[in-house]
Image (spheres, rainbow, N blue to C red):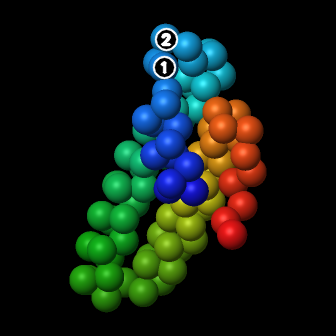
């Protein structure tokens, strides 16, 4: 998926993006910001030894990662016509 996103970024003409494609990129940015914040909180809770909190936070982080994967897959399919399946 990373390689697909790199190809999309290299070949992308920002002015040629559809409204939906621009919205998807915007959503990716928001999810990445959420992921960074949640990961930071997770590290702090791990250092404090709050395993119950860490378990809950990891589940939330996993959800964010799944959303990022899905959204990036949609972008890859839309811009390259290829599936986001890895070989």
* Residue 18 horizontal/vertical position (percent): 63, 16
Locate residue 60: give its quadrant: bottom right
| CA neighbours of label 1 inside 10 A, class few (<14), some (14 to 19), many (20+) | few
**In the depicted structure, whether residue 43 falls above or below residue 76:** below
Residue sitting at 49 percent across and 31 percent down? 11
Residue where numbered disc 1 is placed = 13
Query: In the rendered picture of this protein, how many numbered marks are placed on residues?
Result: 2
* Residue 63 horizontal/vertical position (percent): 60, 61
Left/right placement of residue 57 relative to residue 45 reads right
| CA neighbours of label 2 inside 10 A, class few (<14), some (14 to 19), many (20+) | few
**In the depicted structure, whether residue 26 falls above or below residue 77:** above
Residue sitting at 40 percent across and 60 percent down? 38
Left/right placement of residue 76 relative to residue 57 reads right
**Circle 1 SS class:** loop
Circle on res. 15: 2
* Residue 13 horizontal/vertical position (percent): 48, 20
**In the depicted structure, whether residue 34 falls above or below residue 38:** above
Q: Which of the pair 10/34 is nearer the observer?
A: 10
Q: Are marks 1 and 2 in contact (CB under 8 Å)?
A: yes
Q: Which of the pair 50/22 is nearer the observer?
A: 22
């Amino acid at each position: 998926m990373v390689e697909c996103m790199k190809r999309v970024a290299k070949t992308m003409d920002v002015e040629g993006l559809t409204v939906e494609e621009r919205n998807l990129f915007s959503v990716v940015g928001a999810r990445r910001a959420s992921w960074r914040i949640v990961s930071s909180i997770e590290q702090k809770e791990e250092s404090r030894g709050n395993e119950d909190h860490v378990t809950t936070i990891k589940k939330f982080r996993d959800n964010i990662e799944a959303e990022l994967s899905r959204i990036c897959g949609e972008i890859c399919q839309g811009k390259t016509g290829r599936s986001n399946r890895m070989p």
